Amino acid sequence: MAFGWKLAGDGKNVGAGEVIRPDERLSYGRMIGLGAQHVMAMFGATFVFPLIMGLDPNLAVMMSGVATILFLLIVGNRVPSYLGTSASFVGGVAAIRAGGGNSAAVTGAILIAGLLLALVGVLVHFVGGAVVNKVLPPAVTGAVVMLIGFNLAPVAAKIYWPQDQWVAFITMVGTLIMAVVLRGFLSRITIFLGLIFGFIVSWLFDIAKLNGYDRISAATGKPFPTGTHRVDLSGVKDAAWFGMPGTHSPTFHASFVLLVIPAVIALIAENTGHVKAVAQMTGENLDDVLGRALIGDGVGTMIASAVGGSPTTTYAENIGVMAATRVYSTLAYYIAAIFAILFGLSPKFGAIITAVPGGVLGGITAILYGMIGLLGAKIWIEARVDFSSPVNLVPLAAGIILAVGDVTMKITNTFSIAGIAAGTIVAVLGWHLANFLAPESMKHKHGAESMSQIH
């Protein structure tokens, strides 16, 4: 394991065509700046998704720092990466809460998912990465990622959006404009900027006393009382500057665990894509470390959820920062992790996060959930999956519709498989069954040579 990063060149500049490798660094002042940049890149999604899942965003940010350090240690500092909150669990968590599960049940299911991911990592480490594409080819992983995202549509449309439809609409449009107009680093924190924009819109609506009848409470289905403010920062004033975030112990329920298993498939795709992307940018063959990367993410998710935190995954936003700066030093990620831990130890920071109005989340989730779904299509496109073949078309189409339609398969009086879980089972097992039964003429262009990445 490499510690004591070597100073690259004069420690000030990256020469044309050069990169700062994982075991190198620039001057410490520049590395602190780069670490802060990585914090900003991961920041928006890392606290938005816990908020959506009903988990403590302060704890999520703090544990993302802890998980990142664990990941770097497990991969021997060879894969620069930040472990932020995973979006892949949002659908499963929504299903758990709809089934009566509380936060302890949610984190218990997530912990088991992290354990499964770590076990897959152990298998990959000893057997080799080829087993991933054999069991979960891009045709299948693309479908699972897509159905996870699109299954969430009712959460955005029926829970968050109705709370304040015009704030939601304006926030969505503003975020859309920023996504295509902004350039460089700002373009990579569009969701974070969208939240700030939505906060400002809500505040302006409060000043103008725009408390129309379109503002519906998701809890009661009725209009909010006249005079109710969208932005309530009273909790921020009372919160302390420093303190430990609230933790809780997980509880375990087999029926809830099944609901988050599909997220493990998405995490395998994410980590595989991340390792391949870093290998391509640094010019180093990292195939031998893929298993350890999966173990690292699994362990990070287990440790975070063991205290009530959110699931983790490698972040594409931080790959973008590395690509822009050509600095792949793992020291930047250790610094970013320390920043995150310090942020998580500020209850006042957490109070600001939890004050985000529901209407703002309506506009943000409309974009985020759709993006998750379309990233499944991105996996298909990059792998050139052939949908003229019934082997790909039929089982994947069926699985996606079962998930999006939230179909429930009742197995016994006390056990059922629904939504994302049902769709994933049909997509994975159905594809392999179709591939086994199909004649050789249909077994072509399955797109097993490529994997992609989401959060």
Image (cartoon, rainbow, N blue to C red):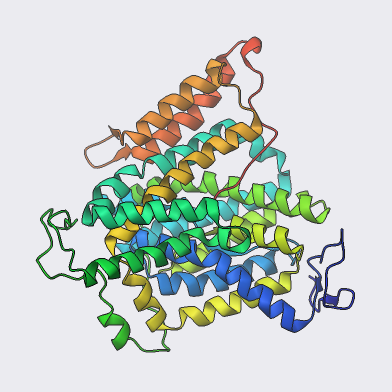
On-image quarter of the N terminus: bottom right
Left or right: 203 as drawn, with respect to 123: left
Q: Using the image as rendered, state which of residue 11 and residue 332 is in the foreground.
A: 11
- Picture coordinates of residue 322, whole percent (x, y): 70, 62
Q: Using the image as rendered, state which of residue 55 and residue 332 is in the foreground.
A: 332
- Picture coordinates of residue 365, whole percent (x, y): 38, 52
Q: Quadrant of residue 198?
A: bottom left
Left or right: 215 as drawn, with respect to 24: left
Q: Using the image as rendered, state which of residue 198 and residue 54 is in the foreground.
A: 198
- Picture coordinates of residue 274, whole percent (x, y): 66, 52
| Residue at the image position 42 percent from the left and 49 percent from the top | 367
451 lies above or below 50:
above
| Residue at the image position 43 percent from the left and 43 percent from the top | 370
| Residue at the image position 36 percent from the left and 45 percent from the top | 152
246 lies above or below 45:
below
Q: Quadrant of residue 74?
A: bottom right
| Residue at the image position 40 percent from the left and 79 percent from the top | 245
91 lies above or below 410:
below
- Picture coordinates of residue 66, whole percent (x, y): 56, 73
Residue 417 appears in the picture as rendered: yes
